[in-house]
Image (cartoon, rainbow, N blue to C red):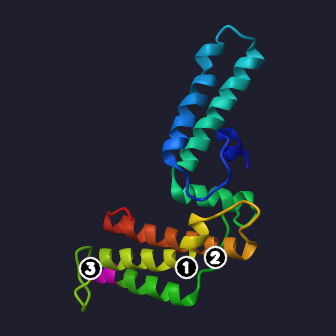
Amino acid sequence: MEFFELFDIPPMLIINKELLRKKYFELSRKYHPDYFANTAQADQQKILEDSALLNKAYKTLTNKDETIKYVLKEKGILEDDEKYQLGNSFLMQMMEINEELSETGLEADDITGNSLSEKLNYLQTEIYEPVKNIIESYKEGTTSKGELLQVKDYYYKKKYIDRLASQLGQKL
């Protein structure tokens, strides 16, 4: 996997951000275009491409959701613009929250006194729990396709919840 190879770290779903940052700064110096100003045009172009790749890789690997998406895409489990079908029970929960959001406004509490924000936080925890161990202990070549399919389901559910959270003006 190109991004992991670039940083010389094993593929994983949760990245040590301090180690990644350290390697990023080392590589930034190595691939900085200013150091190659007096080289051939082809070399300068290659360094610009390497620098752009480094920045893209760093941006991806510092974001947990983007890292998951990247690994799943590299494994052929997730495709761009995929029409992924979420389960009916999850969609029903989301429909209820959407209705609450549109009917009662952003500050509304439900009949149990839980705010929509609390519901979304609870759902976030609920969808993460079944894949927590897979995500936290992912190992290239050991984690099964079935486990990665579970992570894919989590990824799409989280995207849905994040979209609702953004309507509430919060970040989960």
Task: Indicate which disc, 1 or 2, sits on the residue closer to the N terminus.
Answer: 1
> Residue 31 at x, y = what percent?
63, 25
Residue type at mark 2? Gln
Residue occupied by mark 2? 150
Say which residue appears at 74% left-offset and 14% top-offset. 41
Label 1–label 3 contact, CB within 8 A: no
Label 3–label 2 contact, CB within 8 A: no
Q: Nearer the viewer, residue 168 or 65?
A: 65
For mark 3, give the secondary structure: loop
Asked if residue 10 is positioned above or below residue 48 in the image, the reply reads below
> Residue 102 at x, y = what percent?
33, 79
Image-based side of 94 in relation to 37, left or right: left
How many other residues sit within 10 Å of disc 1, few (<14), some (14-19) or many (≥20)? few
Give the CA separation, mark 1 to mark 3. Answer: 24 Å
Q: Which mark is residue 161?
A: none
Q: Nearer the viewer, residue 124 or 79?
A: 124
Label 1–label 2 contact, CB within 8 A: yes
Residue 127 visible somewhere in the drawing:
yes
Q: Nearer the viewer, mark 1 or mark 3?
A: 1
Task: Indicate which disc, 3 or 2, sits on the residue closer to the N terminus.
Answer: 3
Asked if residue 21 is positioned above or below residue 139 in the image, the reply reads above
Q: Which mark is residue 130?
A: 1
Q: Which mark is residue 115?
A: 3
How many other residues sit within 10 Å of disc 3, few (<14), some (14-19) or many (≥20)? some
Q: Nearer the viewer, mark 1 or mark 2?
A: 1
Q: Choose top left, top right, bottom left or bottom right for residue 23.
A: top right
Range of magenta residues: 100-104
Image-based side of 133 in relation to 124, left or right: right
Residue 156 visible somewhere in the drawing:
no
Give the CA separation, mark 3 to mark 2. Answer: 28 Å
For mark 1, give the secondary structure: helix
> Residue 107 at x, y = what percent?
22, 75
